[in-house]
Amino acid sequence: MREARFDARGSRIRWTEAPGGAGRGEVPAVTARGEVPAGTAPGAAAGGTGRREAGSGHAGRGERPAVVFVHGLGAASTVYHAHIAARPELAGRRMLFVDLPGHGISDRPADFGYTPEEHADALAAALDEAGVRDAVLAGHSMGGRVVIVLAHRRPDLVSRLVVTEGNLDPFPPATAGSSGIAAYTEEEFVHGGGFARVLERVGPTWAATMRLADPLALYRSATHLRAESEPTVREMFRGSRAERVYLQGERSGELPGADALMAAGVDVVTVPDAGHNIMFDDPDAFTRAVAGTGTSDRAGHGAARTARDPAPHAA
């Protein structure tokens, strides 16, 4: 487990890692200090020096970028994504499973706002501490909104965005989990039994991780998902220079505004027979999207496909 400070009080955001390994033709993984692990053959790293610039975190020649998994509201990254890390398509990749403030193993300060922007800044602190740059950021639901905001604020950290049913617009529908939480006042939810009632309604899968979240952090995170921003999250996503993929579960219905996203170069993929948790419902499709083997690599040319369709020029 690793950690980084994200506020003036010294509160810490925490994550676990699956360290990358050097496969055939790949640059060996390095530590966060830029050091090649013991046992690496001389000259095996980029430039033949066995090292790269300390703390740079940039993917070197032949090295694939790190993958950073970011969970949704009331969730935890390892629970939702650890099974993906074992997939052969991601062999050798450095992978980080980050718990946002107020969730999982991260700290939960009471004076923190838990806005998407504050979550994004905390995530940036984790990536800076880890020495990660040009990463693949895979964000689910609220985490999708957070990684889009991060790419807007810190484009140096992101090479590719994989957004799974992310919150692109304010005021989610009444059926969304965040709407059920935001229906309470903060006092009612945190101290008046609202948290317990929501846990009873959301079902055992979500409740298993939601009960680990701080109620205050959960409430503030949910209410801020309903807030507007300038520019909007959808505008940030359309305007990002990173490669972008949006995964939509077929059971969740059509993605509003998909045509405009595709016109902006976003690869919009509908996953058949999947709901909101695509990484559970169809881990094959989710892994292909994260690995870049199931999406278009044509910069600036978005596509609308189902996950069963072949990807043009798949990487």
Image: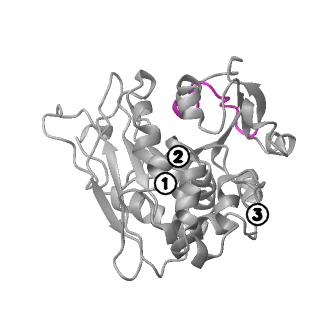
Main secondary structure found in the magenta portion: loop
Circle 3 sits in a helix, a strand or a loop, which is it? loop
- The quadrant in which residue 2 appears is bottom left
Is 67 on the left-hand or right-hand side of 9? right
Residue at label 1?
A: 210
Q: Say which residue appears at 36% left-offset and 24% top-offset.
A: 25
**Residue type (three-letter) at the residue carrying disc 1:** Met
What is the span of residues highlighted in magenta in the rendered image?
A: 288-300
Q: Say which residue appears at 40% left-offset and 44% top-offset.
A: 78
Where does the image place residue 51, in percent across and percent down from the top left?
Answer: 25, 46
Crowding at mark 2 (Cα within 10 Å: few <14, some 14-19, many 20+): some
Crowding at mark 1 (Cα within 10 Å: few <14, some 14-19, many 20+): many
Q: Which mark is residue 232?
A: 3
Magenta run includes residue 194 = no
298 or 272: which is nearer to us? 272
Question: Between tags 3 and 2, which lies in front?
Answer: 2
Q: CA distance from mark 2 to mark 1?
A: 6 Å
> Is residue 276 visible to the viewer in this orientation of the structure?
yes
273 or 6: which is nearer to us? 273
Where does the image place residue 35, in percent across and percent down from the top left?
Answer: 22, 49
Where does the image place residue 179, in percent across and percent down from the top left?
Answer: 70, 60
Q: Which mark is residue 206?
A: 2
**Residue type (three-letter) at the residue carrying disc 3:** Thr
Q: CA distance from mark 3 to mark 1?
A: 27 Å
- The quadrant in which residue 247 appears is top right
Q: Quadrant of the C terminus?
A: top right
Confirm or deny contact between disc 2 and disc 1 (CB under 8 A): yes
> Which badge, 3 or 2, is on the more N-terminal residue?
2
> Which badge, 3 or 1, is on the more N-terminal residue?
1
**Residue type (three-letter) at the residue carrying disc 2:** Trp
